[in-house]
Amino acid sequence: MLKLLLASQNPGKLQEMQFILRDLPIQVISPAEIDIDLDVKETGKTYAENAALKARAFAEASGLLSLGDDSGLEVDALGGEPGLYSARYAPGADANDADRRAFLLKNLEASPRPWTARFRATIAIAQPRGEIEFTEGICEGEIIPEERGAGGFGYDPIFYLAELGLTMAELSEDKKNKLSHRAKALEKAKAFLLRYGHK
């Protein structure tokens, strides 16, 4: 069975990837399972560059096919911000997810609604020899001023999917793993993973 190393220590991300790829002959493993502990600085200027930095570093360290990803929330009223800096978009250094959501809403106060937005994810899959394959996924929605739902993380409680009448945080795990930006990028990556596994 093909082993795919996730270039992240995030247990939620690992669970999500394992669920989405469960129908393929692939074992998604975490760095901890093979005693790898890397801290890759996200110095890229694009999602693809950051995803590639992570994927390549883990592939080189492990000799395994490795998957890195980078994603962000792009709000049209803010010119695409926070974008690449979504995880670090905050009024202070010790900010948490709730602080980031409050900061985003404060910055949107002067703009008329609807606050259209999208989550964008880029996945990079690095081979041990250095070649990299990229896929992208986008989930369109809008930002709403009140938090709803207890699921998800980050900006999920204020990211509203109008066609469902629900925020990302109100979706079941199963539904989110079909609709999310990361799920869509991973779905596109399946064809490459199957080809690679049959080499």
Image: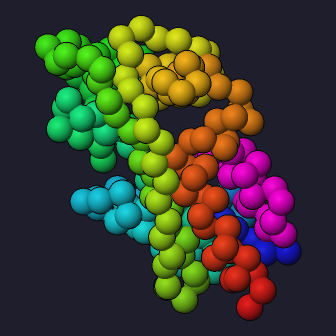
Quadrant that contains the C terminus = bottom right
The answer to whether 32 is drawn above or below residue 133 in the figure is above
Return the x and y of residue 82 as percentages of the image width and height.
27, 37
- Tell me what residue is drawn at x 58 percent, y 83 percent: 128
Residue farthest to the left? 110
**Residue 169 shows in this picture:** no
Figure colour scheme: rainbow
Quadrant that contains the N terminus = bottom right
- Tell me what residue is drawn at x 17 percent, y 38 percent: 79
Q: Is residue 108 left or right of residue 87?
A: left
- Tell me what residue is drawn at x 58 percent, y 24 percent: 164
Return the x and y of residue 72 as percentages of the image width and height.
38, 43
Return the x and y of residue 106 as percentages of the image width and height.
23, 14
Return the x and y of residue 105 as percentages of the image width and height.
28, 16
Taking the magenta stretch, the answer to whether it contains residue 121 is no
Which image quarter: residue 98?
top left
Which image quarter: residue 28?
bottom right
Taking the magenta stretch, the answer to whether it contains residue 24 is yes
Q: Which of 172 and 125 is in front in this view?
A: 172
The answer to whether 139 is drawn above or below residue 158 in the figure is below
The residue segment tinted magenta is 6-29
Q: Is residue 81 left or right of residue 182?
A: left
Q: Nearer the viewer, residue 7 or 94?
A: 7
Residue farthest to the top? 146
- Tell me what residue is drawn at x 38 percent, y 26 percent: 142
**Residue 144 shows in this picture:** yes
